[in-house]
Image (tube, grey):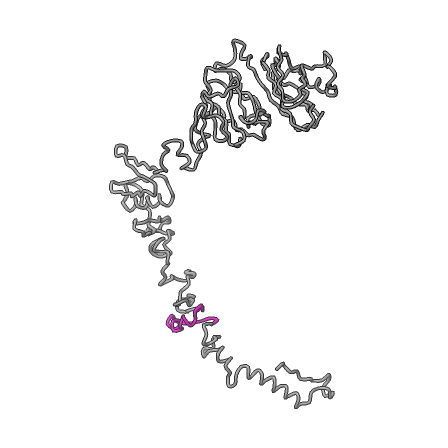
Amino acid sequence: MAKQLIDIGSVPNDGTGDPIRTAMDKVNDNFNEVYNALGPSGGTVLTDLINNDLEIELLATANKISFLYDTITEMEAADPATHHGCIAHVHETGSLYYAHGTWRRLLSDASEGAITSYTDPLATVAYGGSLLDLGDVGADGTDGQVLTTDGAGNFAFEDPAGGGGGGSGEANQNAFSQFLVAGQDTVQADTTTDAVTLVAGSGITITTDASTDSLTFSSAGGGTFSSLSDASTASITLDQIALQATTIHTVVAPDSLKYRFDHYGTTDNPTIHAQAGTTIAFDLAGVTASHPFLIRFENANYSTGLVHVAIDGTVSTGTNAQGKTSGTLYWKIPADISGSYGYLCSAHAAMIGIITVASAAGGGGAGGGLVFRTPENVTTSTLNPDDYQSIDVNGHKGYAIVSIQTTSASWIRIYSDASSRAADVLRTITTDPAPDSGVITEIITQGAETVKFTPAVIGFNMESPPTNIMPILVTNTGGASTQISVTITTLQLEND
């Protein structure tokens, strides 16, 4: 039933309110509803909520708001299983307890007196005696106790040994305990009775040398290599560290027209410089199977001093080291050679470059190495028919042109300086250059062709100051869009 309100009217006795009987009926109804809710003759709600000690307790359940007992005995009479999770205060001990299987005492402020009958579960592994003895005050009334152990898993705080003399065995044990805590790297024995036990861990061997009173710790390790082929078993590669090289060139093959080397940036098929009597290496990880790498000399594969190490450690030498597409190729350059050697792809003729080997004695005498025959290779971007491209070729300040090779029909012009090249851009293919135009030479090919110059054409750089750059123009004279690769072979006539 909802609560009923008695209408008392607007003013006394105005005749608008409830009649007395109706009003009292509502009073009875409201009272009876409350009475029946609490229960007749005291009701179940009141008797279940307030116990005989006038404590708030919901009987026949495990719920109780609080307890207050004078003695431990009174509290323990309350079944902790029935009152699981409840708390209680015992005036006798001044402590707070909670029910969990048994009545458990909570650690509290000890400023008003000692905490009795308390056992810290950490005491067996952290310290001995009372919790209040945690190194604060020693037995002699001084601060600074140390943690000690008897070696059997028992720990205790004790006073440190006093100074002077050799000290006692207990003091030495304390010192060793300090070593364990502080993590120092030495332990000093102060008496002949001191004993320290060292246990070798997994994979560790301890050896002693009585003559020097020393201990040696060593790892069992993972075994040794019987040969480089064991690298695959060990899941490592040895190709880049198999031999000591003065430099390792990382080789990549972006396409079928060029090799590139990390030392030379984005230069296509650059001239590699080396010195006799040294070892150089070519890391072929970026070559791929389509571009086998060869070292050449005078149009033949070269073999002297070549050592190839595969990524699994397999070693090949001489001619067997040629044509590899992975691993590392080492060239132990003989000390008695010099001049121009080559590198090329066995599958693509355009991928060719020079390795210039300086004599082991260095420059000077007999022309200082100016007789090297040096091919320089460059490749254009894709050119439409009749389009041209300006390219700077690495050359020499003074040189003699021996030959020019192209991969497709083209018009090749070589200049003494960049400004002469710029002034000659619009000249037609059927017009001869003026005598003072700065044109060193030019050729027109009908396809892939090599033009030999007999006699050689003398060329030079006319920049101020002179550089070793040969400015050239390449025009596509064929009928289809293509890239054009140009190889210019020269003899060096002037020191760069």
Question: Does the magenta segment cover residue 186?
Answer: no
Q: Which residue is drawn at 55% across and 84% down?
A: 36
Q: In this view, does 441 lie above or below 261?
A: above
Magenta span: chief secondary structure:
loop
Residue 164 on image: x %, y %? 29, 41
Left or right: 184, with 271 as reference point: left
Q: In this view, does 58 lie above or below 112?
A: below
Q: Quadrant of residue 201?
A: top left
Q: Residue at x 53, y 26 (%)?
A: 346
In the rendered image, the residue lying farthest to the left is 192
Residue 189 on image: x %, y %? 29, 40
Question: Does the magenta segment cover residue 75?
Answer: yes
Q: Quadrant of residue 437?
A: top right
Left or right: 93, with 264 as reference point: left
Q: Nearer the viewer, residue 225 or 255?
A: 255
Q: Which of 342 and 41 is in front in this view?
A: 342
Q: Quadrant of residue 425?
A: top right
Q: How many marks on residues?
A: 0
In the rendered image, the residue lying farthest to the top is 366
- Which segment is the magenta one? 64-88
Q: Nearer the viewer, residue 32 or 487?
A: 487
Residue 218 on image: x %, y %? 34, 37
In the rendered image, the residue lying farthest to the bottom is 21
Quadrant of the rendering where the C terminus is positioned:
top right
Q: Residue at x 32, y 36 (%)?
A: 216
